[in-house]
Amino acid sequence: MPVIKDAVCSLCGSLCDDITVTVEDNKITKIENACILGHSKFVGMFEHDRIETPMIRKDGELVPVSYEEAIGAAAKILVNSRRTLSYGWCSTSCEAISKAIQLAEETGSLIDSTANVCHGPSALAAQEKGAPGASLGVIKNRADVIVFWGCNPVHAHPRHMSRYSSFSKGLFSTKGRKGRKMVVIDVRKTDTAKLADRYVEIEQGSDLLLITALRSAVNGHEDVIPQTVAGVSKEEVLELAETLKNAQFSCVFFGMGVTQSRSKYKNGDGVSSLISDLNQHSKAVMIGMRGHYNVTGFGQVATWETGFPMAIDFARGFPYYNPGETGANDVLVREEADAAIISAADAGAHFPQKAVRHLAKIPVIQIDPYANPTTELADVVIPAAVVGIEAEGTAYRMDAIPLRMKKLIDTEFKTDEQIAKDLIAKVRELKGGA
Amino acid sequence: MQAVKLSLKKANKIPIEADTVSPDNFAGKTKEEIEAILAWYGNGQCPLGDFFTVEVEGSDSTENTKIVFDGDVSRVKRIGQGMSAGEIEINGNVDMHCGFGMKGGKITINGDADSWLGCEMKGGEIILNGNASYYVGSGYRGESCGMRGGKITVNGNAKDYLGEHMCGGEILVTGNVGLLPAISNNGGTIVIEGNATMPASEMKNGTVIIKGEVSDMLPSYKEDGTEEVEGVTYRKFVGDVNASGKGVLLVK
Amino acid sequence: MSEILIKNANLCDPIQGINCENMDICIRDGKIVESVSENAEIIDAGGRLTMAGGFDGHTHSAGKINVGRFINPNDARRKLVPGLSGPEKRTEKTRAQVGYNTPNTYAIGYRYAKLGYTTICEAAIPMLAARHTHEEFKEIPILDKMGLSLFGSNWQVMEYIRDKEPEKLAAYVAWGLKASRGYGVKIVNAGGGEAWGWGKNVNGLYDPVPNFDVTPAEILMGLVEANEKLQLPHSVHVHCNNLGKPGNYETTIETMKMFEKVKPTVDRQSLHVTHVQFNAYAGTSWRDFETGAPMVSDYLNSANHLTFDLGQVIFGPAVTMTADGPVEYANSRLLHEKWSNQDIELEDASGVVPLSYSPKSFINAVQWAIGLELALLVEDPWKIMFTTDSPNGGSFVNYPEAFTYLMSAKKREQVISGFGQMALDRMVLPGIDRELSFYELAIMTRSMQSKMYSRPEKGNLKVGSDADIAIYDIIPGDIDPSVEHEKVKQAFSGAAYTLKDGKVVVKDGQIEATPMGRTYWVNAKVPADIDSAMQKDTDIKFKKYYTVSKSNYMVEDSYLPNPVEISTEGVF
Ligand code: SF4
Ligand SMILES: [Zn+2]
């Protein structure tokens, strides 16, 4: 009975790498160390609605076909398209992402990740101010003040606090939670907030006002702060600023509450500036709480292969980048895309109505282990192995630390990487023949 | 004088990238020559003649060339990119990046403009008789200097991030603007006759005048008496203190 | 069997002592051989300058450079050097390219090859993130690659030094190199990375590292002992303390002196000091800042135990990226620039800050001069590696421009004429008339690297060496580089031919083929008992302090598609 140790959980951006998995008869029968979310990914694989076979839509119905036929049909769509959108690629390996980028390059497509609907603004923020961060173990060993801003790890990253942040213990943080101040800033009292030493409730969409006020306080300009800002009293702002300034080491973990609220990336931009200002007094860093387990990996691979982390348009043969113009949502809402590949992402759930309606009108290729509302829209459906369980590969944790995901069980399904390679080969063949 | 009239033959969804459409590139060219100029359309290039009916009257230098778009070109990007002289008139809505990096001449738009109008503009004039979208007169992603010179007039409203990273020149908006106008600017003048939200965040230098209502004034400005401009008295704020800024923000 | 005969090459191969002599070069199966058959493919070099492929022994081209790309999307569109920067469409043979200081991986491979370079050494691998470096290596075409792993603020290293356990330290270094597939030991601002964990720095060689009770000097001496115990092919590679601070030349010379007593166990230097330009500053503040190059050069002329590289500045935009976290933070505050930081648990720090060097700034002008002063005042070119610490001092695509600074006093005068008096008063460059020859340039750009990295098959065209060859469009006898510097620049900007392992990869400045290069890494053997004693300590580190499992720390074979394992035998 093989027992696999130190497997990587490929569910959330925490990418816990201490999972013990027992496999019997090519089935996972026991999971140790994973949280409830991770557990459900490992075992849920057999419960979810797996796509069992490649399919092509014929006369309105999806009918089973061979991989070869599906790849052929997909390649034909790509070759005939003037503006393909390739979207998703955040719940797969870096090796697959690399091939997906090459496919986009060879077909003059536009490729974007799910960051388009979650942490994309943090990239824009970094492009304004940089990203002063640290690996998670630095927080574990050093941080005495931890701020969760607009994120709720209790539910979204269940083991984050025990492995990396609030409750973790390290060389200089031997007392764990007792030696730390935990601050939560949010618009409502989340379960994470309930665990905090200090909860600061802010008005919806006013993050930048509070960030700016904190900066003014940290930089010695108390006088410009009004009596209340962002629904928070000046007194509380000053106290919070003092807590941060007097820390030995503070870390601000920020989530979609920050990146997706009004003034979007300018919030992340502001946090980055706040961190820089704080370092005049004490050590401070920031880390984005990435959701999809390899959304960070997409950003990394895309950046070294194209120069840009997301929203890359290859229409002119070289990469062009301009979120707001070249983002997945942008070209769908504007009805520009005339074909789409969607990999391991539920476009139906993430995009506005108008974008989804447009998807319904154009040929859609889905590459995914699981059926989801995108399947309903798809013209070609290509099932894939589940990366991190049925296929190995690289993923980047939220702090940009790369880890190798293991293959735990065998499968008949092709990997995303292989599917992308097959598509490249077929596209070349069709173009060569034309 | 050379007059070139372009009429879109058929409305398009995939944008036409018209960075080749400028007086600099059209001056002295015949109808046939202009029709043959290539423009990107999705992942391929097509001659302008495929998209537009082209009429040309006269032949002249760049300064004396005027291009008129007859009707809506809301899916034609980059019109007038980098132009140095002459004139463009657009009688309808226009797509993104109109007047990107323009150095001189004049663009008049009788319609709405999509985002990045006059992005990284260095000189010349843009008059928009309609509403503008995001990032009027801003810079490209990651760049620290946006608009550097020239003037943009928006006779209408503008959305967020107007004049982001502006380093010089002038922007006038007669209507309201969205979030964070004049963010991270480092020079130039912005006048907003209507309302604005969170203006002049991290301004280092420059002048911003807001004649309408300001919502959510950022807590990083020092009030410093009043200042009179053209007979109107404004409250004067100086900042952004967190950027050690010397910018002047005048509000009613 | 594939054979090539390069006829009529004007060979400049300092390792063989050949100084621009016309001869034929025979290649079989990627190696230089005595002779080839009549069937050999013939390349007529036409008397043009021929050298071994260039070897950039200190460049930031994989790993941290990605942060530079990420925060500067505006760099992608910069076209400052024609043919070697900016966006370029994909072609049948090449992937799409972008960038100037921070090109994408493909552009890095193509553009180095166009310059006639065939080997690079990434200057900093953070071990915990080593997979990332190797993932980028995989996507850098053509070039052979190696990387240096960071040890200078590592907890286990500092503890072993504090506790006087040199054998376990050596075992740990061996293990770290294996885990990260590194080629050598990099030390950046020894101890400073740990101090930066608390937002602090160390202020010199004898300032103890907070909580670890060791000094930078002890870290340096401890690591060099381990390095030599393991008989590593490269010496320790040191980024000195106090980088970027006026007055730091004293620390630099002190550091160099400390290594005089070290006996290398391999026939090479016992110390390489990197980007000395940033560490050769005199004065006490930016106000009275001036060149420290004459003092440093004097010392270097008297010493024979070390090599160094320049870190030459190129005017225009650059991106600084270093494991020296506190320096980057200081840069960003001073220059009001973007700031990225990445501290790595138990190991080191790092930062990335873009900036621009202007000839109008007296500080930048003096920095520019210091690099050249070092190159011209140090007599023996075998001690000097040419670098810009790309892209810290400027992008490597400017190497041809920089070569003309070295080869032409007239060219230097042209640049210097744009400086203000204040800058001129703080430098000695205007008084230097030395002009380097092609022979000396070849030493600094390929030959000295062969010895410095113990890669006898690189940096020369002896029989048996790798057939990595650059042919430049210059007839050495017909050109006066002092006057015709523009021609020199042109020729070095796009090789007439670059061969990699006997395959033509560049022809007339254009990419012809893109084979996958090798990755060199070092496997140093350590006695089993010492290794297992060390592993016990490592186990504790992983159990208590790291956030990844030990088994997931080691870079797997699959990340090195074309590995070359260099085995060494530790002497314990
Ligand atoms: S915290 Fe995230 S990565 Fe860790 S086990 Fe839970 S779901 Fe998996
Ligand atoms: Zn370096």
Image: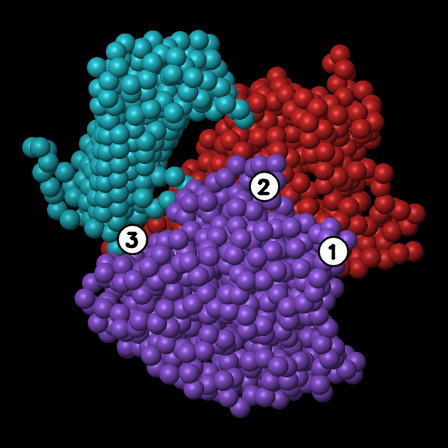
Chain colours: A red, B cyan, C purple
Camera-side residue of A174 and B199 = B199
Q: Which mark is residue C21?
A: none
| Rendering quarter of residue A171 | bottom right
Q: Quadrant of the C terminus of chain C?
A: bottom right
The residue carrying mark 3 is B243
Is residue B132 among the parts visible in the rendering? no
- Kindly identify the amino acid type of the residue bearing the numbered disc 1: Ser
The residue carrying mark 2 is C95
- Kindly identify the amino acid type of the residue bearing the numbered disc 3: Ala
Left of C551 or right of it: where is C395? left
Left of C37 or right of it: where is C222? left
Q: Residue at x 75, y 39 (%)?
A: A418
The chain holding disc 1 is: C
| Mark closest to the chain's N terminus, 1 or 2 | 1
In space, the residues marked 1 and 3 are separated at their CA atoms by 71 Å
The residue carrying mark 1 is C37
Q: Is residue C24 above or below residue B1?
A: below
